[in-house]
Amino acid sequence: MRDEEHRARDRESLKRRRWRSDDFTVVVPLYGHPRFFANRKELKHLKANVLVAMDVTESVMRDFALQLVAEGWQVVCTTMHRPNPPLLIRFALESGQVTTTYVVRVDADTRPLEDIGRYIARIEEDGADVCSAKVHVADPRRQAQKMQALEYRMAMLSRHFRPC
């Protein structure tokens, strides 16, 4: 009788398990030049969940911000002096445009290997507060990008991630 109860509980747990969640915002800090948003095509299917936090001090960045908005991306702009990713993330969070439970930072030149929604479903299930996902440099062409890609691959060897 006890085994049947366990099996019934396991079946019920599987029914409740969510394989994907949309309760997340991907914040992409962008500054310097539009070419640094190399992973835009990789995030296109998540466009509704992506918030690009960008510095628009330069006219090329202002034009690019307008282009992103026209393409349907969510954008929050600033003209801060010497922007950096932590400041842009903070600016995005304080903008009021992030209304989800989970926030995922993805650098403008990197992309996740798996569906972020699957990561979030597992995070929700596990009740984790902080997580780290494996990432890779998008299309490394120049020597510096290739070195960064190698650095990322080495760093990712130490990261544990779900989903399986």
Image (cartoon, rainbow, N blue to C red):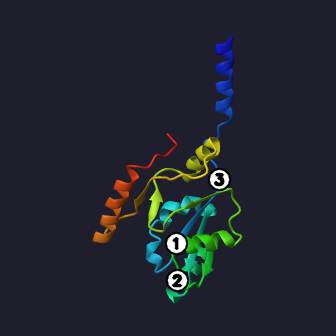
Under tag 1, what secondary structure?
A: helix
Question: Does 44 appear above or below 32?
Answer: above
What residue did someone put label 1 on? 85
Q: Position of residue 97 (x, y in %)?
A: 69, 69
Left or right of residue 8, residue 34 in this image: left
How far apart are the alpha carbons under marks 1 and 3? 24 Å
Question: Does 68 appear above or below 151?
Answer: below
Ranked by sequence position, the earlier of labels 1 and 2 is 2
Identify the image quadrant of residue 143.
bottom left
Instruction: Give the amino acid type for the residue marked by disc 3 in the picture.
Output: Asp
Residue 142 visible in the snapshot: no
Ranked by sequence position, the earlier of labels 3 and 2 is 3
Label 1 close to label 3 by CB (< 8 Å): no
Q: Residues within 10 Å of mark 2 (few under 14, many from 20)?
A: some
1 vs 3, front mark = 1
Residue name at image x 56 percent, y 58 percent: 45
Give the quadrant of the N terminus.
top right
Under tag 2, what secondary structure?
A: helix
Instruction: Give the amino acid type for the residue marked by disc 1 in the picture.
Output: Pro
How far apart are the alpha carbons under marks 1 and 2? 16 Å
Residue projecting furthest to the top? 1
How far apart are the alpha carbons under marks 3 and 2? 29 Å
Ranked by sequence position, the earlier of labels 1 and 3 is 3
Q: Position of residue 162 (x, y in %)?
A: 51, 44
Identify the image quadrant of residue 14.
top right
What residue did someone put label 2 on? 61
Under tag 3, what secondary structure?
A: loop
